[in-house]
Image (cartoon, helix red, strand yellow):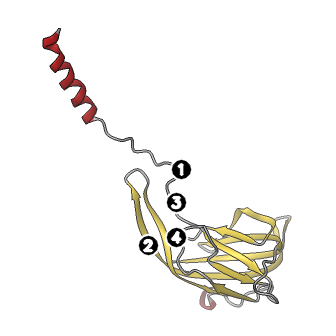
Amino acid sequence: MKCYYPIYLIIIVSFLMACEKDDICAETNPTTPQLVITFKDANNTTENKAVESLGVYAIKNNELVLIESINGINTDSIAIPLRNDIEISDFKFYKNYSLIDGVMEGEENHIYLDYTTVEVFVSRACGFINNYIDLSVFNYDPNAFGTPTGTWISGYEIINPIVENENRAHVNIFH
């Protein structure tokens, strides 16, 4: 039996060296961050101010896509996804939002975001995520969308032009 001991040891060691780590992306690994927006009081810009019955639609290929997690909620901050396929995102924000017989009701503002996308390699299992830099906010794209309707949003402030995590706000919207 003693003569087989080195053979068993070599087989076990070579078997263990041949194993490699599983390619599983853990939930704790970073994902593409969303844009965090805080709503502030236009008269006192240091105070948060909740938006009553907020609804947010992303505009993609000239179609409105409701962001389900922001559907008629009362809140003073939100996180919304930016587009990865192009370096602009369009959103329609509705205050006092409701959907009656398929018709959107409420005060509307159209917001246009411009940024540069940067791919960041996370791992072989998780692949790449996108971060966003050089963030800019506009009322609308006058060449594509005309004059915006609604005026409940009175201004914007970019407080962090780099979107690489969701730990703090990137944009303040005053109303």
Does the rendering let one see residue 90?
Answer: yes
Residue at (58, 80) in percent of width and height: 160
Crowd band around label 2 with a 10 angstrom C-alpha radius: few (<14), some (14–19), many (20+): some
Cβ–Cβ under 8 Å for marks 1 and 4: no
Tell me the distance, in whole angstroms, between the alpha carbons under discs 4 and 2.
10 Å
Which mark, by number, is residue 118? 2
Q: Amino acid at mark 1?
A: Glu
Cβ–Cβ under 8 Å for marks 3 and 1: no
Q: Position of residue 133 (x, y in %)?
A: 49, 79
Q: How many marks?
A: 4
Q: Position of residue 77 (x, y in %)?
A: 73, 71
Secondary structure beneath dot 1 equals loop
Residue at (76, 81) in percent of width and height: 40
Of labels 1 and 2, earlier in sequence is 1
Disc 4: which residue: 164
Disc 3: which residue: 31
Q: Amino acid at mark 4?
A: Glu
Front residue of 98 and 126: 126
Secondary structure beneath dot 2 equals strand
- Image quadrant holding the N terminus, namely top left
Tell me the distance, in whole angstroms, between the alpha carbons under discs 1 and 2.
22 Å
Residue 23 in the figure: left or right of residue 49: left
Which mark, by number, is residue 2? none
Disc 1: which residue: 27
